[in-house]
Image (cartoon, rainbow, N blue to C red):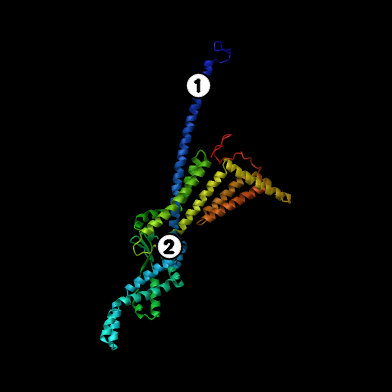
Amino acid sequence: MSSTEPAQPGQPDEGELAGLHRRIAQLEATAATPRAEKHRLRAFGSTVLIIVASVLSLLAVIAVWAHDEVHDTDRFVSALAPLAHNPDVQAAVTNRITNAAVQQIDVAGVVNQLSTGAADQGVPPRLAQLINGLSGPLTSALTDLIHSAADRVVTSDAFATVWEQALRAGHATMNKALTGEGGGAVQLTNNEVTLDIAPAVQLVKAQLVDAGFAAAAKIPDIHTDFVIFSSPDLAKVKSAVRLLEILGNWLPVIAVLVAAAGVYTAVNRRRALVGAAIGVGAAMLLLGVALAVFRSYFIDHLPSDASPAAAGAVFDALVTFLRQAVRGVGALAVLVALGALLSGPSRAAVAIRHIGATGMAGVRSAADSIGFRAGPVEPFVRRWKRWIGIAILLIASVVFVFWTHPTGLVVLWFAVVILIAFAIREFLAPSPAPTPDGAAHPLPGEDAPAAGGGSS
């Protein structure tokens, strides 16, 4: 129909059609704008929540560690007790005991007694005067004698017992390191966490007396301190660490809830779950690097008379469980990210699921060929298959939450057990092997990908 021909009765003319097209375009634009704006707001809110959750996960790991260091005596002792067998710590303690004991011995008085005794025995005056000049050599000899006795004590099982007892008895005041309050064997003075090793000094005195050095019996009770931790910034951070110690039971829960809110708010929840896991993993990596950097800073700012090797050993013992927690949470984040990716619609994920389903179908076929029968279990599992998978994940999550101090190895074993449980489910009710271009089910509440498309 030409443009000059009149429109047939009942048919709209070209002007009306153009108007309808414009109206439809306006309606589509009006409907698309609020939806796009809504998606942008959800994406922004989800991103903010995930970032906050990542930061909170870092603080939560520190909080749990600080909480346990204060309240769990066995955990604290198990971390520091092995230091009694560390050669660098033994050498540092030996030197500390030796210096403290030598300072309590009046070498000049001992020399004067020797000179007077020699004169009383008829020794020529000149020889008695020579004895008066033995102060320096005698100090050196006494130092060597006390050092040898102290070394025998510190490297013995008796010292290990004394060390552990001192740790256990003083753990009630370990919050001194966080608050500066309290007293006992473990104390915080001048930005130093110290351990009183007076019992070890008593053992050295007994060794010296048994060896025939009677003057050692006159050494008074010495409450000398061995520095466990020293930092000029300790007083500055103790309030913040104390706050984290108080929040130790709640911060992990808050971090998980914030992360869950971030995933729930997202438009693409699978992608948000991957992002949250990566964020937590990055936070654990950052904390691990921070521990390594702070260790170097701590050793570089030791007093001039401190042993860097012993200080490094003590630092490593103090953060042993913190490092384990970092590895455990980091491993969990990696596994969650992998799980979310493998359940997605990407070609690699679909291919891996295809291989798994094909392999399990082959195992089931082989079992059937030798007489295996699942009986009524197979229709039950097939009917409730999706919910059984959800139950496996929920049970594993609950057990993991109540697991005391999971490590990276524990996380690995959890992953193995979950895979075995899903393999048994698939064995009892095999699914048709998905085609390489098959689409995965979206997470609850997530929009299914459009045909021919996919989401990362």
The residue that label 2 is drawn on is 313
Residue 178, position as x, y percentages in the image: 38, 58
Residue 111, position as x, y percentages in the image: 29, 80
- Taking 254 as reference, is 111 left or right? left
Q: Are marks 1 and 2 in contact (CB under 8 Å)?
A: no
Q: Which mark is residue 22?
A: 1
Q: Quadrant of residue 146?
A: bottom left
Does residue 234 appear anywhere in the picture? yes
- Taking 357 as reference, is 291 left or right? left
In terms of depth relative to the viewer, which is nearer, 89 or 321? 89
- Going by the numbered disc 1, the residue's amino acid type is Arg
In terms of depth relative to the viewer, which is nearer, 355 or 169? 355
Query: What residue is shown at x 57% (from left), y 15% (from top)?
Result: 11
- Say above or below: 194 vs 151: above
Residue 446, position as x, y percentages in the image: 54, 39
Does residue 375 appear anywhere in the picture? no
Q: Which mark is residue 339?
A: none
At label 2, counting other C-alpha atoms closer than 10 Å, the crowd grade (few under 14, some 14-19, many 20 or more) is some
* Label 1 SS: helix
Query: What residue is shown at x 47% (from left), y 34% (from top)?
Result: 38
Q: Earlier in the sequence, mark 1 or mark 2?
A: 1
- Going by the numbered disc 2, the residue's amino acid type is Ala
Q: Quadrant of residue 440?
A: top right
Distance from the alpha carbon under mark 1 to that under mark 2: 77 Å
- Say above or below: 20 vs 211: above
Which quadrant is home to the N terminus? top right
Residue 429, position as x, y percentages in the image: 66, 46
Q: Viewer-nearest of labels 1 and 2? A: 2
Query: What residue is shown at x 28% (from left), y 79% (from top)?
Result: 133
